[in-house]
């Protein structure tokens, strides 16, 4: 089932997510629905708080909605940036419509998480995957990619978005 996405400036995107206490059937269904939603919205990653479930759960499939080579589910992920090297790339977010902007992030990360069977796994990632993991992990902390932009860019977007929402509702 495709889930509804929360969109900026929805305050619920700003909550800090709670750890998944137990991997129940409900959690497995949520993960499946998140993957479906991610593909339907043409994203490569999605975090549970984006679908109004403040839980520490991410799904990522870098191959995207056309290839669907396989989504990875990360439950209660712990993220570590491996060195000082930075990388900059243009990011967008399903919860932040009509904005793409360059963001600087750690070039290499290590993530420890549980899979849907509750088995711990560790991954090291660079390039797009490292960026995607940091972006999705931020959602669990209530951080959006636009928080990494300059205040000027952030304010411009906030203003534009407010105006648009006002027009849609009038
Ligand atoms: Zn996002």
Image (cartoon, rainbow, N blue to C red):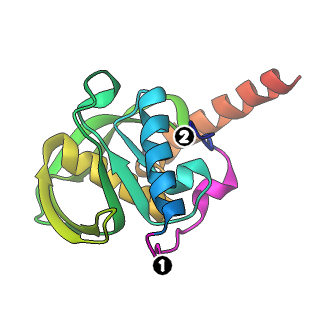
Determine if the C-beta at disc 1 is less than 8 A from ligand 1.
no
The residue indicated by pointer 1 is 21
Instruction: Answer with left or right where residue 62 lies relative to residue 138.
Output: left
Residue drawn 18% across the image and 68% down it: 121
Query: In this view, which residue lies farthest toward the right?
Result: 170
Name the front one of labels 2 and 1. 1
- In the rendered image, is residue 93 in sight? no
Helix, strand or loop for disc 2: loop
Helix, strand or loop for disc 1: loop
Determine if the C-beta at disc 2 is less than 8 A from ligand 1.
yes
Disc 1 packing (10 Å; few <14; some 14–19; many ≥20) = few
Residue 133 is one of the magenta-drawn residues: no
Q: Which mark is residue 95?
A: 2
Instruction: Answer with left or right where residue 154 lies relative to residue 80.
Output: right
Closer to the chain start, of discs 2 and 1, is 1
Q: Which span is picked out in magenta?
A: 9-23
Image spot of residue 157 (x, y percent): 58, 34
Residue 54 lies in what quarter of the image? bottom right
83, above or below 105, in the image? below
């Amino acid at each position: 089932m495709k889930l509804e996405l929360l969109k900026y400036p929805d305050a619920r995107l700003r909550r800090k997510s709670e750890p998944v206490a137990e991997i129940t059937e409900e959690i497995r269904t949520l993960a499946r629905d998140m993957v479906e939603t991610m593909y339907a919205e043409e994203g490569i990653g999605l975090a549970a708080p984006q679908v109004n479930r403040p839980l520490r759960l991410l799904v990522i499939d870098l191959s995207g909605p056309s290839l669907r080579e396989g989504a990875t589910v990360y439950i209660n992920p712990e993220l570590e940036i491996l060195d000082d090297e930075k990388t900059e790339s243009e990011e967008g977010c399903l919860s932040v419509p009509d904005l793409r902007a360059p963001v600087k992030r750690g070039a290499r990360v290590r993530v420890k998480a549980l899979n849907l069977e509750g088995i711990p796994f560790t991954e090291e990632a660079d390039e797009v995957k490292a960026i995607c993991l940091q972006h999705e992990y931020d959602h669990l902390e209530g951080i959006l990619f636009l928080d990494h932009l300059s205040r000027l860019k952030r304010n411009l977007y906030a203003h534009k978005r407010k105006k648009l929402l006002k027009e849609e509702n009038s």
